[in-house]
Each structure stands twice: as C-alpha cells, then as structure tokens.
Amino acid sequence: MIEWLMAASWSPYLVGAGIGVLIWTVFLLSDRPLGCSTAYAKTAGMIESAVSRQKTESMPYYRKITPTIDWQWMLVVGTMMGAALSAYLSGGWSISVVPPLFKESFGTDEMLRLTVALTGGILMGLGARWADGCTSGHGISGTLQLSLASWIAVICFFAAGIIAAGLIYGFSFL
C-alpha cells in the first residue's frame, strides 16, 4: 500500500471511485453536497469578524453563511495537507515562485508570476462565489445529482480553461 501512496501518479479509476465513495459518504453524513469555495468566504468572514464582529454579524451574507470552522472548512485544510503529503511521499515536493511552464512562456520575473497568480486566484474565487459553487461543488457533487446548472457550469469551466490556456500558452493544441 505504501508504494501506491508514494507513486508519482495514481490510477484515475481508483481515484474516481474514491471520490465517488467520498461524495456518497458526505451526502450520507451531512445531507449536503461537497464543495470548497464557501470555506474561502467563511475565512474572509472570520478575518472580518476579528476586526469588527458587529459589522460582520450585520451583513446578510454572513447571516446566511456563518463564518465558522466547519467540516467544509476542514476539508480545504485537509486537501492542502494531503496534497503536500502526497507530493512529499512521491518525491515531487518542491517550492518555486516561478514554475518551469511559466518560465518557458513568460520568463523569470517573480513579480509578474505573483501578480498573475494573485489575479487568477481572485478571479477564480469571485467566479466560484458568483456561480454559487466551485469545480468540486458543481463538477463533482452537482453533476452526480444530475443538476442542469452544474452540467452547464462544468461545460463553461472546461471551455474557459481551454480558452485561457490557449491565450496564455498559445493554441498549439488546436
């Protein structure tokens, strides 16, 4: 089993089956879909609450989505820890400000890389909240429930990803 955990890549069939079991378990235990983007909004609410609890409690959004640590918030933390552990065990762990693919296309400017990463992260977060869910919420939980909105969202995720990759790295794949 330890060799499987230390592999550089895992079988997509086993991982897919594992995600299916995870989603089934989440629905069974929490009666809610799996998703991660709400955890980021909750984190912003917790930070804002530390600065001004009264202001945060008066906001309609945070009355609906209480800024607390819950299982979805812990899922995000666990995902980051699991990814780091997996990279470490497989020998792929490395920290770089400018990854090789970015360096090939745009050079070694660290400020450009950080600006692009920050801008992309903010846009992804805003898009996830605007769509009322992220790729895990729509792409995994929503499609599993045969939600039309989730299927449309997933098609848009793929189309936007292809277009963005083409614009950033060139359309050599066409």
Image: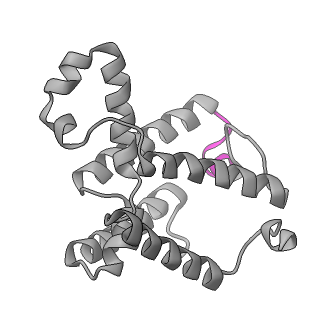
Closer to us: 11 or 59: 59
Within the image, what quadrant is residue 48 found in? top left
Closer to us: 19 or 99: 19
Q: Residue at x 82, y 57 (%)?
A: 89
Closer to us: 12 or 101: 12
Q: Residue at x 19, y 19 (%)?
A: 55
| Image vertical order of residue 4 relative to residue 161, above or below | below
Q: Residue at x 43, y 45 (%)?
A: 120
Q: Quadrant of the N terminus?
A: bottom right
The image shows a total of numbered marks equal to 0
**Is residue 49 at least partly visible in the picture?**
yes
Q: Residue furthest top?
A: 51
| Residue 12 point in image, percent of width and height | 63, 80
- The reply, left or right, for residue 93 in relation to residue 101 is right
Magenta-tinted stretch: 102-109
Q: Main secondary structure of the magenta part?
A: helix
| Residue 141 point in image, percent of width and height | 36, 71
Q: Residue furthest front?
A: 29
The answer to if 83 sits in the magenta stretch is no
| Residue 82 point in image, percent of width and height | 66, 54
Q: Residue at x 31, y 72 (%)?
A: 142
| Residue 52 point in image, percent of width and height | 27, 14
Q: Residue furthest bottom?
A: 13
| Image vertical order of residue 131 relative to residue 4, above or below | above
